[in-house]
Image (tube, rainbow, N blue to C red):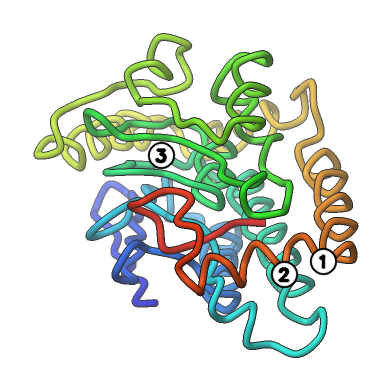
Amino acid sequence: MAMHESMNDAGVVEIVMDNPPVNALNIGDSYRLADLLDSVRRRPEVKVVVLTARGRGFCAGVDIKEMQQLPGNEGILAANRSCFELFRAVYECAVPVVTAVQDFCLGTGIGIVGNSDVVVAAEGVLFGLPEVDNGALGAATHLSRLVPQHRARQMLYTCESAPAEELAGYGSVYKVVVAEKLMATAREVAERIAAKNGIVMRAAKESMNGIDPIDVRRSYRYEQGFTFELNLHGEGDRARDAFLAGERSGHDEADGDTR
């Protein structure tokens, strides 16, 4: 994956994911993005991070092809660990993370967005977890930060997606705008935050995490235990092989999967 980083004079860092066709993340991608976010702690000049993607989809999940090419359980183990590290790095980033979401956001994308601080989305963006269809579980922790509990359960059980406009009604998506205004809106929000005192803002981010009612790291790790169990049952391999064989599309727009 190509990953582009730039910073403006206001201290706003933009990270752009760019991995055609649908921005699925492989194991190395997830670790690289986590490292970029972790590095902010040692860069006091950074005030805000804007995370977005180029092309079709914000993120379609992990790279199933890579997982199935690795021997034994190496693929599922590495994918689980890298996703855990990525979601943790978004949550623990020393400054607020603004995500700008286009087209669709599935699986791993839900983990990223659900752990970010402010979300803006283009009109018609779909958010969803195809986990059950993939013989796995995970990121319901983060979906539950975006939609109410019973809606999250219904979405998990049916693999149904929810539009950005619905999430805006819950307040988890700050603004829904036409696609052409997505980045301008994300930058506007980021620069409003960046104009505040940087030391105070870093303290504000840490304090918000400290009073969170749910430990998202422990909660997600608990979910991953069931993914490991399902993989030992063979359900994960069967679902991934069916996807690669073209027997199951899950989401027509998605070429990825998530743990």
Horizontal and vertical percent for residue 102? 28, 43
Of the two numbered discs 2 and 3 on the same chain, state the one appearing first in sequence: 3
Q: Secondary structure at mark 3?
A: strand
* Image quarter in which the N terminus is found: bottom left
Do labels 1 and 3 touch, CB within 8 Å? no
* Residue at 34 percent of width and 62 percent of height: 22
Q: Which residue is mark 1?
A: 234
Q: Which residue is mark 3?
A: 98
Q: Quick check: 78 left or right of 205?
A: right
Q: Secondary structure at mark 2?
A: helix
* Residue at 53 percent of width and 42 percent of height: 110
Do labels 2 and 3 touch, CB within 8 Å? no
Q: Amino acid at mark 1?
A: Gly
Q: Where 9 falls versus 81 (above or below)?
A: above
Alpha carbon separation for disc pair 2 and 3? 34 Å
Instruction: Give the numbered dot on residue 237.
Output: 2
Which numbered mark, 2 or 3, is in the foreground of this view?
2
Q: Quick check: 21 left or right of 110?
A: left
* Residue at 66 percent of width and 42 percent of height: 139
- Binning the other alpha carbons within 10 Å of mark 1 as few (below 14), some (14 to 19) or many (20 upward) gives few
Instruction: Residue 237: name its quadrant.
Output: bottom right
Alpha carbon separation for disc pair 2 and 1? 5 Å
Horizontal and vertical percent for residue 216? 76, 37
Alpha carbon separation for disc pair 1 and 3? 37 Å
Q: Residue furthest top?
A: 169
Horizontal and vertical percent for residue 176? 26, 23
- Binning the other alpha carbons within 10 Å of mark 2 as few (below 14), some (14 to 19) or many (20 upward) gives many
Q: Where 43 falls versus 125 (above or below)?
A: below
